[in-house]
């Protein structure tokens, strides 16, 4: 056993002092049934658990927390489980994105105000991942991330179903009159097959892969399906490693650097990851004090081949990815593109962590010579419709539409869209450009995943399955289609999207990275003068704080006052 100095532990300040406060801290632990041997001179390792009955993806987290606890005890730590807000994508409205920063604040403050020497962060469902990493970075206390892991693959009849993606697909078939109620119910019964996160390369899996590349997880953690025995073992190992991290004081600020942020972006591109990751990586970089522009994503996209053949942009699911060798095997093939010296929670560099990882199936994890696409899956467009930039997941778009000009069909907000989209009299053809506004951070609010606007029923019936769609919304990582997202500035604050009218010609040119609103400048000015700002959505509470401080999509949608770290902000203990 290496010798450690317990007086260096943060928790020592709470438990060791011969003061009235120290007496209080110790006596109350004793009231819980712990004696000195349990906690004195041991690292206090928190298990920050986002378990909730209302988070369908984390239903195994009670068991996993016990397994983490076991690992902490084995290594001589004192485990404490601390519940933090859960952000369950399926049931929270209007959108979990509205609460990502609230969870990030909670994680930061929970870490700071308690006698915690290190922590295992248990998250998985989309926004829980960036939120926990952001909070950990700002507090800068040693933290390891334990991803929930994906669900098992779903089976329906003779087909493999992927969460989200196949729900959209079969909903379209149902609307087109091609799917009976019995089949639709059968899909409902089987598409979520186990505990765990969406098993496509949606936002949860994308962010888990990014957490692993940033060095926040043990090797291979991002792809292990939630209900496998390997996932339980990962939980135990994570507990053990968190104890080592408390002694070694390996902090998030040592993991997140400009180089590791580039690795995270490269990972997002090579797995054909979710567009949501762009917003989250911008926010994570902001917490680390790293200046990052949207254009960096485009630069790295141009030089990164897509090696993960994963739905929704490819063919396979997370369980296939895991069986093929997982993220380590993919990154090993991409070695020459990565900054290999970046540190990880295992105490090894990323290069050491992936060294020799074997890719077992070249269909799922392609080789450098046979990529899914020679360039990354996501592009940043700019133009007079989106001066601050917007994004398109070109790899999940119909190639025939990535250079397209068509007349706008405009929906003022989501209610207007629902009311109008299936109107048989709607003046729309397959060449139209569907435009949704009031769907951004402030306008919706919370920038919901409305960006994959539904195809009008009458066009579905004609066999149309993709169209150009433009909005200031986000899109689910499990979505697909020619959807231009995150238009910035958003319409609610008077961005050009607010001024578009039915029939205006809009051009997208993905190769040229352009989005153009073909309007006469004098006419645009006339509309700008006539535009009136909408009423604020909130007059009190969290909503008002959110609306007053959330930054634009191109800046990561963090609160302006949360940028950076405050690691030295230790509470006084009098
Ligand atoms: Fe939780 Fe998709 S709903 S990860
Ligand atoms: Mg999602």
Image: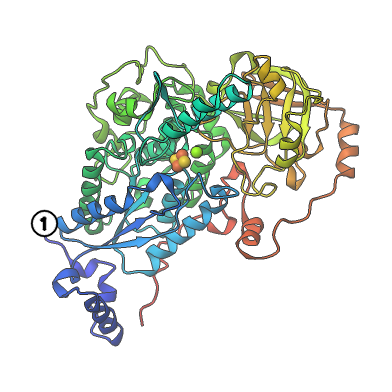
Pick the quarter of the image with the N terminus: bottom left
The secondary element bearing badge 1 is classed as loop
Residue at point 54% right, 50% down?
92
Residue that label 1 marks: 2
Which residue ends up furthest to the left in the rendered image? 1
Q: Position of residue 179 (x, y in %)?
A: 56, 22
Q: Is residue 175 left or right of residue 303?
A: right
Q: Could you tell me residue 524's position as x and y percent?
A: 86, 34
Residue occupying the point 32% across, 16% down: 362
Q: Is residue 163 placed above or below 574 in the rendered structure?
A: above
Q: In which quarter of the image is the C terminus?
A: bottom left
Residue at x 46% of width, y 29% of height = 186
Q: Which image quarter: residue 210?
A: top left
From the viewer's side, name the closer residue of 268 and 543. Answer: 543
Label 1, residues with CA under 10 Å away: few <14, some 14-19, many ≥20: few
Task: Give whichever of 540, 366 is nearer the camera.
Answer: 540
The one nearer the camera, 266 or 33, is 33
Q: Is residue 102 left or right of residue 236?
A: right
- Left/right of residue 396 with respect to residue 447 in the rendered view: left
Residue 386 visible in the shown view: yes
**Quarter assignment of residue 383:** top right
In x, y percent, where is residue 336? 35, 24
Height in image: 278 above or below 567?
above
**Residue 377 in picture, x, y percent from top left:** 51, 24
Q: Nearer the viewer, residue 391 or 363?
A: 363
Q: Which residue lies furthest to the bottom in this view?
A: 20
Taking the image as shown, residue 554 lies to the left or right of residue 503, namely left
Instruction: Report the residue at 44% width, 31% height from top.
Output: 201
Q: Which residue lies furthest to the front in this view?
A: 182
Q: Can residue 242 be seen in this view?
A: no
């Amino acid at each position: 056993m290496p010798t450690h100095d317990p007086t260096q532990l943060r928790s020592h300040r709470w438990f060791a002092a011969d003061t009235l406060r120290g007496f209080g801290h110790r006596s109350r632990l004793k009231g819980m049934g712990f004696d000195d041997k349990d906690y004195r001179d041991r690292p206090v390792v928190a298990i920050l658990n986002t378990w909730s009955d209302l988070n369908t993806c984390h239903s195994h987290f009670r068991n996993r927390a016990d397994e983490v606890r076991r690992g902490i005890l084995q290594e001589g730590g004192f485990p404490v489980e601390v519940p933090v807000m859960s952000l369950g994508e399926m049931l929270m409205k209007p959108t979990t994105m509205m609460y990502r920063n609230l969870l990030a604040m909670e994680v930061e403050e929970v870490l700071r105000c308690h006698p915690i020497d290190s922590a295992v962060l248990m998250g998985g469902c989309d926004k829980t991942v960036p939120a926990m990493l952001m909070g950990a970075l700002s507090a800068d206390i040693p933290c390891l991330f334990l991803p929930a892991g994906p669900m098992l693959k779903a089976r329906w009849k003779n087909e493999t179903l992927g969460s989200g993606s196949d729900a959209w697909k079969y909903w379209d078939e149902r609307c087109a009159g091609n799917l009976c109620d019995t089949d639709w119910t059968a899909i409902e019964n089987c598409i979520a097959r186990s505990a765990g996160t969406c098993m496509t390369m949606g936002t949860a899996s994308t962010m888990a892969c990014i957490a692993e590349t940033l060095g926040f997880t043990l090797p291979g953690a991002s792809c292990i399906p939630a209900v496998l025995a390997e996932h339980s073992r990962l939980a135990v190992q994570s507990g053990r490693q968190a104890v080592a991290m408390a002694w070694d004081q390996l902090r998030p600020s040592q993991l997140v650097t400009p180089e590791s942020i580039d690795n995270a972006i490269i990972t997002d591109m090579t797995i054909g990851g979710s567009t949501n990751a762009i917003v989250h990586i911008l926010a994570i970089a902001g917490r680390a004090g790293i200046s990052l522009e949207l254009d960096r994503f485009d630069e790295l996209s141009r030089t990164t081949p897509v090696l993960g053949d994963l739905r929704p942009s490819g063919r396979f699911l997370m369980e296939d990815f895991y069986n093929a060798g997982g993220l380590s095997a993919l990154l090993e093939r991409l070695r020459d593109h990565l900054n290999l010296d970046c540190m990880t929670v295992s105490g090894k560099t990323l290069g050491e962590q992936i060294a020799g990882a074997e890719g077992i199936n070249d269909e799922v994890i392609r080789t450098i010579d046979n990529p899914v696409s020679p360039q990354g899956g996501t592009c940043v467009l700019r133009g007079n419709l989106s001066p601050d930039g917007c994004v398109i997941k070109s790899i999940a778009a119909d190639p025939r539409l990535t250079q397209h000009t068509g007349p706008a069909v405009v929906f003022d907000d989501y209610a207007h869209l629902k009311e109008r989209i299936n109107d048989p009299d709607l003046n729309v053809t397959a060449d139209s450009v569907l435009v949704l506004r009031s769907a951004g951070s402030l306008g919706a609010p919370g920038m919901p995943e409305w960006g994959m606007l539904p195809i009008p029923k009458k066009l579905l019936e004609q066999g149309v399955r993709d169209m150009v769609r433009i909005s200031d919304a986000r899109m689910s990582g499990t979505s697909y289609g020619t959807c231009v997202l995150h238009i910035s500035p958003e319409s609610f604050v008077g961005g050009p999207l607010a001024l578009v009218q039915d029939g205006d010609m809009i051009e997208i040119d993905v190769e040229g990275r352009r989005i153009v609103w073909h309007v006469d400048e004098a006419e645009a000015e006339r509309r700008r003068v006539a535009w009136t700002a909408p009423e604020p959505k909130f007059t009190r509470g969290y909503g008002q704080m959110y609306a007053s401080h959330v930054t634009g999509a191109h800046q990561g949608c963090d609160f302006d006052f949360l940028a950076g770290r405050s690691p030295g902000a230790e509470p006084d203990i009098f």
